[in-house]
Image (tube, rainbow, N blue to C red):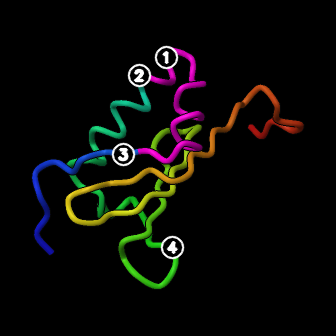
Amino acid sequence: MPHQDLYEVLYTEQAARERDRLDPARRASFEKAVDLLARDPYTELSRPIGAGEQDREIRLTSQIVAEYMVSRGRLLLVVLRIFDDTDILLVED
């Protein structure tokens, strides 16, 4: 399926709040990952969630998972799940 060169990236209010809470280093990594995703939202690293191909999930960084929708040249980040390694009970080697 052919794709555009760059999809417009939009955020739900919830996803924007999570994005805005990132510290500068994680925000920079997040922005780089979103830029890559905007070029190919159907990357093989993403997976569909639900019945169609438009609702997807991807691990953007080691600590950020995104659920997003693709439609008409737009990529809507719906949910961001941000993990903080400092709160792990058992660290595996």
The residues bearing labels 1 and 3 have C-alpha atoms spaced at a distance of 21 Å
The residues bearing labels 2 and 4 have C-alpha atoms spaced at a distance of 27 Å
Compared to residue 38, the image places residue 54 above or below, namely below
The residues bearing labels 2 and 3 have C-alpha atoms spaced at a distance of 17 Å
Residue pictured at 10% horizontal, 69% vertical? 2
- Asked whether 1 falls inside the magenta stretch, the response is no
Earlier residue among tags 2 and 3:
3
Compared to residue 58, the image places residue 1 above or below, namely below
Residue 49's disc number = 4
The answer to whether residue 91 is left or right of residue 1 is: right
- Asked if labels 3 and 1 touch by Cβ distance under 8 angstroms, the answer is no
Residue pictured at 49% horizontal, 39% vertical? 61
The quarter of the rendered structure image containing the N terminus is bottom left
Dot 4 falls on a residue whose secondary structure is: loop
The residues bearing labels 1 and 2 have C-alpha atoms spaced at a distance of 5 Å
Q: Which of the 4 image quadrants contains residue 28?
A: top left
| Residue with the mark numbered 1 | 25
The answer to whether residue 60 is left or right of residue 65 is: left
The residues bearing labels 1 and 4 have C-alpha atoms spaced at a distance of 29 Å
Dot 3 falls on a residue whose secondary structure is: strand
Residue 49 drawn at (x, y percent) = 51, 73
Residue pictured at 36% horizontal, 76% vertical? 53
Residue 28's disc number = 2
